């Protein structure tokens, strides 16, 4: 009788154990809506970078953020020494077609290692700072990504393990570059395809290298805190039908992001310029307005730059500012002691096509102090001819993007931008998203 009671008790305990709720960490994580990545600024190079975790051993490294980059490429000795889950993308496979590979590489090592595999789908990786390119095979491994509450594995994430020389010119803390361009194997594209989230991402670039990081959110996010009430102005993203990289296949759209610019205003006055330069030549791909985080400052075609500088100098000097010798790469510099407040210098507006929407830059994003001197300069530079492809007339650079909330809605081909976050009493270092 005693044994029967014990048996019944054990049975009841087993049922209770089976029916009892499990701890949260043992349950399958919920379907994610967005993934978050930190964005930091390197003080030496002014490059913006994020953190990547990849492989069976979760190798972690930093990679420069490139809005126009095609895919992730890097060279990491830590990853090389522990890449047991690395797999080359073979030529002729579906993933090779997805990557739009430009050839096959053969490297007869046994066993194969990252960067040296046989019959491997290949492509050119570009270092936009040194201008060098590396032709190498593409492979896959498991990427580990973070939502606001959970970590998720993404198997078969494509990338290139590149030659170490391709890292020349990158920020010291980084091992490669993560592409966020309009391709099918960029970071946001693969996350959207794998998890069924929206094909969009938002970035908020920090202005300080010493404070809290900014943030990138891939997918649709709900913003928290002071960002909850930040509205975005939107304008269409424009496609350039001609590749801006000489090694892209003819007939492919460029991976870079463009917007339609109608005019430029300085201090409320429309700058006189050749407006055909603001249009993309559908035959050559020249002209237009691009968005690139790998350009530290906004680049303007020579005649546009001259007209903007002339109007800006006129406005600043009317406030009593004294112009001084220019400091390269800038063309208009001033004695900082004669400019009492950055907020009072002439605003610069990029007026989008249609005229109803404009992106306004205040002195915080249009003026930059040169080193530790008492010289401040207009943070726009004169452009040069692109030796490897068509020349873009206006390229909005990272400094002008700092402390703005920017959204790239690739799914609907829209670009959204906030007003300067300083007007909301916050900055990208305060960024929060769920």
Image (cartoon, rainbow, N blue to C red):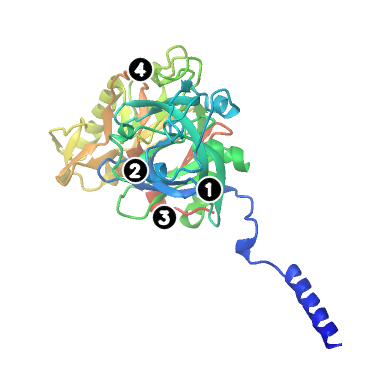
- Kindly give the residue lying farthest to the left in the view shown: 325
- Kindly give the residue lying farthest to the front in the view shown: 110
Structural distance between the alpha carbons of marks 2 and 1: 21 Å
Mark sitting on residue 174: 2
- Kindly give the residue lying farthest to the right in the view shown: 1
For this rendering, which residue is in front, 221 or 338? 221
Mark earlier in primary sequence (1, 3)? 1
Structural distance between the alpha carbons of marks 1 and 3: 17 Å
Residue denoted by label 1: 35
Structural distance between the alpha carbons of marks 2 and 4: 40 Å
Q: Residue 130, located in which quarter of the rendered image?
A: top left
As helix, strand or loop, the secondary structure at mark 4 comes to loop
How packed mark 3 is, by other alpha carbons closer than 10 Å (few <14, some 14-19, many 20 or more), is some
Nearer the observer: mark 2 or 4; the answer is: 2
Structural distance between the alpha carbons of marks 2 and 3: 24 Å
Mark sitting on residue 430: 3
| Tag 3 near tag 4, CB within 8 Å | no
Above/below status of 432 relative to 267? below
Structural distance between the alpha carbons of marks 3 and 4: 40 Å
| Tag 1 near tag 4, CB within 8 Å | no
Nearer the observer: mark 2 or 3; the answer is: 2
Q: The N terminus appears in which quarter of the rendering?
A: bottom right
Percent position (x, y) of residue 412?
Answer: 58, 33
Mark sitting on residue 274: 4
Mark earlier in primary sequence (2, 1)? 1
């Amino acid at each position: 009788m005693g044994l029967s009671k014990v048996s019944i008790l054990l049975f009841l305990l087993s049922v209770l154990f089976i029916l009892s709720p499990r701890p949260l960490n043992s349950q399958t994580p919920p379907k994610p809506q967005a993934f978050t990545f930190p964005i930091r600024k390197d003080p030496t190079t002014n490059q913006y970078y994020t953190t990547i975790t990849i492989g069976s051993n979760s190798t972690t490294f930093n990679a420069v953020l490139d809005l126009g980059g095609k895919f992730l490429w890097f060279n990491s000795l830590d990853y090389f020494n522990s890449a047991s889950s690395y797999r080359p993308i073979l030529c002729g496979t579906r993933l090779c077609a997805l990557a739009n590979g430009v050839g096959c590489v053969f490297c007869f090592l046994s066993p194969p290692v990252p960067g040296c595999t046989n019959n491997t789908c290949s492509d050119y990786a570009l270092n936009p700072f040194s201008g060098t390119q590396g032709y190498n095979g593409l492979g896959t491994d498991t990427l580990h990504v973070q939502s606001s509450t959970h970590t998720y594995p993404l198997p078969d994430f494509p990338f290139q393990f590149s030659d170490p020389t391709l890292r020349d010119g990158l920020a010291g803390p980084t091992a490669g570059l993560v592409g966020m361009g309009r391709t099918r194997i960029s970071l946001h594209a693969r996350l959207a395809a794998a998890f069924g989230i929206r094909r969009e991402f938002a970035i908020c670039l920090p202005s300080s290298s010493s404070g809290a990081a900014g943030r990138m959110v891939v997918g649709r996010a709900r913003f928290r805190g002071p960002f909850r009430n930040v509205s975005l102005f939107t304008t269409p993203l424009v496609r350039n039908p001609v590749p801006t990289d000489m090694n892209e296949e003819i007939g492919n759209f460029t991976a870079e992001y463009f917007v339609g610019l109608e005019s430029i205003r300085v201090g409320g006055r429309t700058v006189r310029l050749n407006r055909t330069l603001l249009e993309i030549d559908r035959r050559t791909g020249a002209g237009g307005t691009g968005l690139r985080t790998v350009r530290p400052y906004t680049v303007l075609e020579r005649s546009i730059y001259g007209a903007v500088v002339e109007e800006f100098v006129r406005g600043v000097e009317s406030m009593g500012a004294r112009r001084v010798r220019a400091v390269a790469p800038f063309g208009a510099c001033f004695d900082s002691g004669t400019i009492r407040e950055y907020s009072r210098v002439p605003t610069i507006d990029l007026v989008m096509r249609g005229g109803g929407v404009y992106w306004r830059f205040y002195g915080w994003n249009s003026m930059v102090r040169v080193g530790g001197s008492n010289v401040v300069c207009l943070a726009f530079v004169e452009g040069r001819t692109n030796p490897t492809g068509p020349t873009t007339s206006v390229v909005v650079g990272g400094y002008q993007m700092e402390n703005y909330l920017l959204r790239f809605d690739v799914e609907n081909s829209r670009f959204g931008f906030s007003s300067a976050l300083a007007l909301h009493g916050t900055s990208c270092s305060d960024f929060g998203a769920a």
